[in-house]
Image: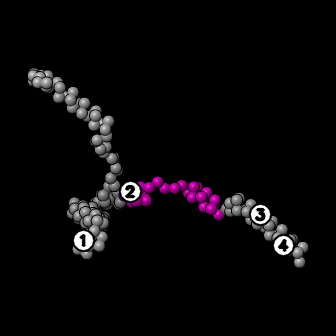
């Protein structure tokens, strides 16, 4: 089976061979399909320092789940957890403080920027992101909750009739 090939033949054969390999691999489901997860956008105060700390915390959490009774792993995880929470709270506090400082500075110096900042803060609240429920829907829902269901009314009538029958039987027995 010794064949001599020209350079042109091998150049044409390579893409055909790669195509055959790709088709076989897709039929065998060898390739992993990328899942398209929607990433939750980070908060404005979440920076790279906090991201690195969080990755370390997650890796130590995985290690803790493998060795839950090891005191060294447990102590390391909880130490990292405390450091992460301290850093997170510090970053959030400094971010809020910087916004308050900029509001104080802009109030007198640049009212246009001041109101622009206030409007951007109003728009970024969590309540405005979710779709709010209309008042009519709320009213209908709670009015339906107050009504007694028809099933229970029929059940009450059945119980009352059985009680009356038992009372009649009791009167005849005595």
The C terminus lies in quadrant:
bottom right
Q: Please indicate, yes or no, whether residue 89 appears anywhere in the rendered image.
A: no
Q: Earlier in the sequence, mark 3 or mark 2?
A: 2
Q: Earlier in the sequence, mark 2 or mark 4?
A: 2
User: Which mark's residue is nearer the viewer, 2 or 1?
Assistant: 1
Query: What secondary structure is found at the residue carrying circle 3?
Result: helix
How far apart are labels 3 and 1 at the CA level? 64 Å
Q: Residues within 10 Å of mark 1 (few under 14, many from 20)?
A: some
Q: Which disc is residue 123 wearing?
A: 2
How far apart are labels 2 and 4 at the CA level? 67 Å
**Occupied quadrant, residue 115:** bottom left
Q: Residues within 10 Å of mark 2 (few under 14, many from 20)?
A: few
Q: Residues within 10 Å of mark 4 (few under 14, many from 20)?
A: few
How far apart are labels 4 and 1 at the CA level? 72 Å
Magenta stretch prevailing secondary structure: helix
Query: What segment carries the magenta color?
Result: 123-146
How far apart are labels 3 and 2 at the CA level? 56 Å
Q: Earlier in the sequence, mark 2 or mark 1?
A: 1
Q: Is residue 66 above or below residue 18?
A: below
Q: Residue at x 70, y 59 (%)?
A: 151
How far apart are labels 3 and 4 at the CA level? 14 Å
**Occupied quadrant, residue 146:** bottom right
User: Percent position (x, y) of residue 157?
Assistant: 77, 63
């Amino acid at each position: 089976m010794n064949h001599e090939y020209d350079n042109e033949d091998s150049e044409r054969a390579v893409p055909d061979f790669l195509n055959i390999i790709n088709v076989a691999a897709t039929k065998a489901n060898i390739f992993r399909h990328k899942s398209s997860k929607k990433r939750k956008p980070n908060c404005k105060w979440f920076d790279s320092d906090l991201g690195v700390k969080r990755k370390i915390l997650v890796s130590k959490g995985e290690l803790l789940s493998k060795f839950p009774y090891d005191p060294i792993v447990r102590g390391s995880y909880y130490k990292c957890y405390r450091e992460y929470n301290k850093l997170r709270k510090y970053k959030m506090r400094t971010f809020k403080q910087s916004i308050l400082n900029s509001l104080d500075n802009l109030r007198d110096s640049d009212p246009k920027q001041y109101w622009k900042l206030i409007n951007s803060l109003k728009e970024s609240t969590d309540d405005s992101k979710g779709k709010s429920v209309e008042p009519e829907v709320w009213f209908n829902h709670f009015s339906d909750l107050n009504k007694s269901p028809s099933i229970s009314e029929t059940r009450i009538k059945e119980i009352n009739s059985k009680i009356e029958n038992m009372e009649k039987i009791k009167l005849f027995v005595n």
